[in-house]
Amino acid sequence: MSRLNRLPPETAEARCGEHFIQLRHSYGRLPQAYLDLGAASPLALAATLQLDQVLRASRLDTRAVEAIKLALSEAAGCDYCLAVHVLVGRRVGLDAASIAALRAGTPSGDAALDAMASFARRLLATRGHVPASEVTLLRNAGYDDAQIAESLLVIGSIVITNLFNRVNDTAVDLPPAPALAR
């Protein structure tokens, strides 16, 4: 059950109508996270969707984007985002073992994705205070400066949704992410 007070459904629909229409078109339904975010703050929904739109033009490939989102959703313990990004990860070509490894911080078999996921986890854990060697590791993994800068946008995007879903306790309306073996 949502923790945040929400607009009545008809008011949320009036304020977020175009966004809700686009989301229904994209997903075939209105995902609970977007419904709750829009109902709590149409501005927050619009900003989140705008950032997602900008990220579609990123020079990072979709697998690197998902590596970041899987790693940080696991670190945040965000069940909603984990459910979403396990599904999206599969759609962009990550197999179950790679997804589990990226979530757990263990080798996935793709050194570049591992480097990006590690960078994202380290950046979040140190509040951005990473040594130059971390950036060098990304460069050595094949990422250029534009991709490194764009990874920060991806990190910001997933942190926003992780935080919202954790604060709101958004109901997971997707198949849950598999538990990791510990």
Image (spheres, rainbow, N blue to C red):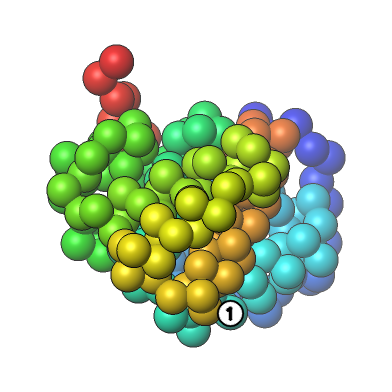
Q: Is residue 9 above or below residue 102?
A: below
Q: Is residue 29 above or below residue 105?
A: below
| Badge 1 element | helix
Left or right of 107 on screen, residue 75: right
Q: Residue at the location (34% across, 32% down)?
A: 104
| Quadrant housing residue 100 | top left
Viewer can see residue 30: no
| Quadrant housing residue 64 | bottom left
Q: Nearer the viewer, residue 180 or 22?
A: 180
Q: Nearer the viewer, residue 160 or 121?
A: 121
Viewer can see residue 106: yes
**Residue 99 on image: x %, y %:** 26, 44
**Residue 167 on image: x %, y %:** 72, 34
Q: Residue furthest top?
A: 182
Q: Tally the marks.
A: 1
| Quadrant housing residue 176 | top left
Q: Residue at the location (50% across, 41% down)?
A: 121
Locate the N terminus by quadrant: top right
**Residue 14 on image: x %, y %:** 79, 71
Q: Is residue 76 above or below residue 36?
A: above
Q: Nearer the viewer, residue 149 or 74?
A: 149
Locate the C terminus by quadrant: top left
Left or right of 149 on screen, residue 139: left
Q: Residue at the location (52% across, 78% down)?
A: 146
Q: Is residue 39 above or below residue 162?
A: below
- Amino acid at the residue labelled 1: Val
Q: Residue at the location (79% across, 38% down)?
A: 4
Q: Check disc 1: other Cα within 10 Å, few if <14, some if 14-19, many if 20+.
A: few
**Residue 144 on image: x %, y %:** 44, 75
Q: Which residue is mark 1?
A: 54
